[in-house]
Amino acid sequence: MNEVRYNWLMSAMKDMSVQQSFIFNVNPESLHTAEPEKILKDVFGYDTFRPLQKEVIQNVLDGRDTLAVMPTGGGKSLCYEIPALLMDGLTVVVSPLIALMQDQVAQLEAVGVPAVFLNSSLDWDSYVSACDRIVCGEIRLLYVSPEGLNTERIRNVLHSSNVCVRCITIDEAHCISEWGHDFRPDYMEIASVREQFPQAVCLALTATATKAVRDDIIMQLKMENPAVLIASFNRPNLFLEVKMKANPSGQVESFLNEHKDESGIIYCFSRKQVDELTSLLKSRGFNAESYHAGLSDAQRYEHQRNFINGKVEIMVATVAFGMGINKPDVRFVIHYDMPKSVEQYYQEIGRAGRDGLPSHALLLYSLGDLHKIRFFFTEKDNPAQAERLLRGMIRYAECRSCRRKALLSYFGEVYDGKLPDSCCCDVCAAGPLPLADVTILAQKFMSCILRTKERYGASYVIDVLLGARTSRLLENGHDSLTTFGIGKELTRENWFELSSTLASEGYIEKTDDYGILYLTEYGRKVLFERAEIKLPIEFKKHALKKSAGIKTLSSSGYDKDLAMKIKAWRRRKADEENVAPYVIFGDRTLIEIAKAKPHNIEEFMQCYGIGQAKAHKYGPAIIQIVDSSS
């Protein structure tokens, strides 16, 4: 891009009346290596690229098909937005949800980038206007759904004589793979569209993809000699915690009381659970709303927009909510029930802390969740595949060592352990457990497994130990066993704790299908020899404090009074522009402004996330607030 052209672009962005009309006409062969960095700073307001962003961008500019696996919050959108501004022609972004398209277009417009979406949310006049702008060459980025891309109307627009499709980007690309956790048949049509534009480079982006999924994405999209770039799956700002369920609604309420005035998502397995929990939270005074497929389109849209715009703090939802939600200030994600796979879990917890600030992921886990999940396996085309994915999730939930290490290991990454233990997960924050002599308790548990002929899971074995007179137990005659009722010294939760520890230490194992317990050779030897059994276990419950060793926002050293004034102004400005507050700028930028206290436009532009368009649009108001607070 020559200097004259670039300077004209920047002056055009200062004049907001022509903000939507500037157009890049660049020969990619003339690009200089510094140009992506210049766009990064002057348009988007960032000083440096995040891991892999520069490499992905350069591949796209070089015209090489690329598959990039980057964590949620890792900056995937810049990987196609910056090339779209440096290449002549149109970048088509295939995006799964209407809300995601709207958010991304709003954020691009806020920094002066001409972008549109085409979907059912537009009235006819707006739809035609957007198509006209594309055909006239005004638009750099077009967002469409996979099903929309396959319509004759949109294909006609893309084949217009004035339109040159230079890049086809597939967001949430794991949806094209049957090996993935969120397969969507509509994504299968993307390959046929690719064939119509053989000169367009293809960029596939996802946050969750094992090797099998990556290989499938490449095959389905017919990518030729693609670059495969995999960023670290580690999200160091996320604190990972798993708790056995014991009064789950009470556990959620306790957690929320420790995270007052914070935005978060609570995932439930069913619509009924969503409605019941939402009603309970509202009755307790929490600002919560629901989201699931049983609500009308209008209700879902209203609830989602209120959450994105900060008018609702807590969204209680099924998995129908969240893909592509571009809300950076989500501070926590709670799983009220076990997810179906590690991929699903990783993607959903990735919706917290996209701004890089400390955030919390809490999973409530019980064996009852597994029965609910497996009940629906019969409706799947591949129950064996579903069971394989679920077993991976069970291993993560029951692991008794560093959860971050276990999570990264699932995706084939070795954790380098650079975080302080207290910032990592609940296991590390609690510290190493002392070895406890549980010989008698372990003997009771393993004996009960043998007495019931190694045919049952932990829940049934514990029922026998506690003397529960369930119909199933009585029908089997197990109330006459010598182990019936001999384990009342422990609570049900503590017996589950012992079962998990015995499994992790190699005394017992579970079958892959229904979690039936059986003794290992080592376990049998120890039991029959009546050897001493010491395990790293502590039955007394420990409640982690909110911070759990993570540096919180209150310790960041910024002017809190100034931050509150800027936040109030941001809320008013967002309402005025009918956008989410983070479209104006995010919490990280807000905090940095409250630290730096800029007194002129140049100083304001040094703050994180402030490019030229936002500096000239919002700078005068922010500087006035800063000056009046001095």
Image: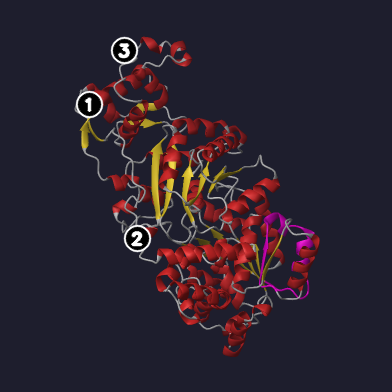
Magenta residues (range): 139-165
Q: CA distance from mark 3 to mark 2?
A: 57 Å
Mark 1 belongs to which amino acid? Thr
Mark 2 belongs to which amino acid? Ser
Q: Residue at x 49, y 69 (%)?
A: 53
As drawn, the residue found furthest toward the bottom would be 4
| Disc 2 target residue | 555
Mark 3 belongs to which amino acid? Thr
| Disc 3 target residue | 482
Q: Quick one: 431 or 560, which is closer to the camera?
A: 560
Q: Does the segment drawn in magenta span residue 162? A: yes
Q: Residue at x 31, y 35 (%)?
A: 541
Looking at the image, residue 215 lies above or below residue 334: below
Local secondary structure at mark 1 = helix
Q: CA distance from mark 2 to mark 1?
A: 46 Å
Of labels 2 and 1, earlier in sequence is 1
